[in-house]
Amino acid sequence: MKVDDKLEPLTVYNYDVTPAMDTLVRHVLKRIPDSYAEGFPSFSVFESCSPWGAHVERADIEEEGKIFCNPRLVNMAKNVAIGILAHEFAHLFLGHTGARSLQCEYQADELACQWGFKKEVRAMRRHLGPPTDEREQT
């Protein structure tokens, strides 16, 4: 996806991250096919604690997505970090909100693979293990 010139005018990308994280995030966004740019929701990216490396917070479908990336993400194996970010952007694109079910986790993995991140999603799963139902953990 062409990050700076193919996005809807109302889509706002706000990065409150270090240059290393910004580079990683932009790398993932640039690999998402251009055909998804029109429907991509607005979001902000922050560096903050995340048990999975990154996660999306969004109260409802109308709210801007907030992607929280653990600062350690930039020190992970690059293919794992890319898989994690692609998975989280897939959650954002799919409109997933709140604690996610196994179905949501598999849908995010599948969409990230469709975007061309199959190798990275597999690396992420080797690193993090299989998807879990977040609703059971709250």
Image: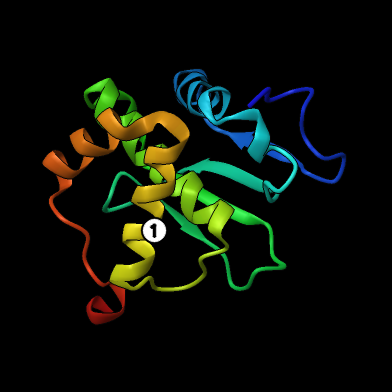
Give the vertical position of 110 relative to 33 (above or below). below
Q: Quadrant of the C terminus?
A: bottom left
Total numbered labels: 1
| Residue 58 placement, left or right of 80 | right
| Residue 63 placement, left or right of 19 | right
Q: Nearer the viewer, residue 106 or 23?
A: 106
The type of colouring in the image is rainbow
Picture residue at 65% right of the left edge, 68% below the top? 61
Mark 1, other Cα within 10 Å: few <14 / some 14–19 / many ≥20: some
Quadrant in which residue 8 is drawn: top right
**Element under disc 1:** helix
Q: Quadrant of the N terminus?
A: top right
Task: Give the image location of residue 26, x and y in percent.
Answer: 55, 24
Picture residue at 39% right of the left edge, 58% below the top? 107
Whether residue 49 appears in this view of the structure is no
Residue on which the image places disc 1: 107
Whether residue 133 appears in this view of the structure is yes
| Residue 10 placement, left or right of 18 | right
In this view, the residue farthest toward the right is 9
Amino acid found under the numbered disc labelled 1: Gln
Picture residue at 22% right of the left edge, 23% below the top? 77
Picture residue at 15% right of the left edge, 55% below the top? 130
Task: Give the image location of residue 134, x and y in percent.
Answer: 29, 71
| Residue 84 placement, left or right of 80 | right
Give the vertical position of 48 relative to 16 (above or below). below
